[in-house]
Amino acid sequence: MPSYKAPVEDIAFLLNDVFRIERYSNLPGFSDLSAEMLDAILGEAAKLCEEQLAPLNRVGDQQGCTRHADGSVTTPKGFKEAFRAYVDGGWLSLPANPEYGGQGLPYTLAAIVNELSSAANMSFSMYPGLTAGAIAAIDVHASPELKAAYLPKMIAGTWTGTMNLTEPHCGTDLGLMRAKAVPQADGSYRISGTKIFISAGEQDLTENIIHLVLARIEGAPAGVKGISLFIVPKFLLDKDGNPGARNGVVCGSLEHKMGIHGNATCVMNYDGATGYLIGEANKGLNAMFVMMNEARLGVAIQGLAQSEVAYQNAAAYAKDRIQGRALTGAKQPDKAADPIIVHPDVRRTLLTIRAFNEGARAFMLWSALKSDVAHRGGDDKTRVEADEMLGLLTPVLKAFLTDRGFDNCVMAQQMFGGHGYIEEWGMSQFVRDARIAMIYEGANGIQALDLVGRKLPRNGGKALMTFMGEVGGFIQENSNDPAMKPYLAPLQTSLGHLQAASMWLMQNGMANPDNAGAASVDYLHLFGLVALGYMWALQARTANDKLKDGENAAMTAKLTVGRFYMERVLPETAARLSFLQAGAGTVMSLPAEAF
């Protein structure tokens, strides 16, 4: 049976020592966040995830969800009670608008809770996670009347939310969407069409489900410029604002999936369902992207979360499993064999995963703080800069963390040998659950195209120059510290690779777009490697400072793992640069019929 322990100490180190969260005390929500309150939040979140959510992870995988003849869905045993505990603990309302019952605390805290809950039980965490995204979209774009009608109950966890984009013939290319909306005399719309892959589309956790649905109003322009966004509740509201008559939306079937069995992934059929326009007509993508961008950050966190829980179980197994002798002689001669942790390749594997986890966690928190500044910053310049940086980094976070997170789950599974392939050990579930994160909320290849085609050139590449300037400035600022040399020299080299790759794209991508397309995934991974390298350099500086006060085993370990990243992971940027500079020639030269 797999286990999970929330990495509270590492999170506290990052927040308090590396990023010095007290520097943000001038922002709304942060001013109320004392050190004692932060410790209490982390401790209670850890307790919930370790004691209530983690034990249900395997239950959800084995039982899955059940659809009944009337279209209703039952979630796995224990999920309903766990959801109530999650809501009663205030975790869903943590960052939400106080005007509608939220606590107004930083998004950064919500991101932390997302990591812990996703590591403990990824399927479960999607129910509140999607609701949080729907809350954000409604809060930003809906009318005051719709906000007042729906946000209080959603923030309270009485109702949940979903996101309905994909159709059977239409995934990434939303311009092909066929779902239609017919205007009614009372200002509402009749929504008809079929949506697929709808996470949490039906469930028994709450009394109502608020679907956010993309559809095309009759007569709207073709393509993405004619798409609108609608609130379509499962139950229409009566005159008192409570669930009344059943709306014309039903779960037609549940998808049979590779993983995340505990989450109901539905085919949703809309048959003249009553819907209410969010924001402006034909501007639905603007509103939906609020939810999608939040969801992409949430999915990035899922990649980290699955990597973390898989690592914890692999490391425990490696210290316990007796097999073979150390190459340098027996370490436990009184036993028949040594634990496999003595073997260099086992250690290499575990360190590769751990170096990612601790670097990715820092990257996630650094980015979450950027999000808080973008939404809560005191002046326009600061908010715009943070928003531009977050826009640049979102595809990197989503794709890099989920690609590597899946790879790490496979490596952790390998630690168990044949036992890793047996369901009772639980490692198979981490691999299966992690796989979806590379696909949904925009497949990772699309994230790479978004990065090189849209995010890099935006505003003349200002955000990229800001990022590289910050990393370069940090290197220069700490260049006279001998203790930092093992971290700064590799980072400087890889930053040069990122600069060279960016220049190559500027020179070759415009002339031949296929060059940009062929280079996109390698560029995204190069960027992600450098970003984690910067995060490790930040942690190394802080760890070195703390060691000046005396011995500290945690900081010594931190520096060792950081050096491993610099020596054994970051050099991959050279290969990525070489790959992308090869261009699109061989990639595009083979005729389609030859495949």
Image (cartoon, grey):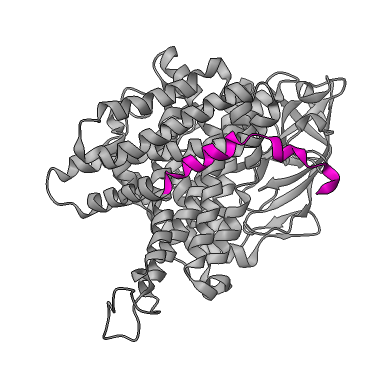
Q: Picture coordinates of residue 246 (x, y %)?
A: 77, 43
Is residue 530 toward the left or the right of residue 299 in the image?
left
Residue name at image x 66 percent, y 36 percent: 518
Residue name at image x 62 percent, y 67 percent: 62
Residue 583 is one of the magenta-drawn residues = yes
Taking depth in this image into account, of 189 and 489 the one nearest to the observer is 489
Is residue 392 toward the left or the right of residue 513 in the image?
left
Q: Picture coordinates of residue 197 (x, y %)?
A: 72, 47
Residues drawn in magenta: 569-595
Q: Residue furthest top?
A: 380
Camera sees residue 504: yes
State whether residue 125 is above or below residue 135: below
Q: Picture coordinates of residue 426 (x, y %)?
A: 53, 68
Residue name at image x 39 percent, y 79 percent: 324
Taking depth in this image into account, of 228 and 395 the one nearest to the observer is 395
Taking depth in this image into account, of 195 and 472 the one nearest to the observer is 472
Residue name at image x 18 percent, y 43 percent: 546
Residue 318 is one of the magenta-drawn residues = no
State whether residue 560 is above or below residue 577: below
Q: Picture coordinates of residue 233 (x, y %)?
A: 71, 37
Camera sees residue 157: no
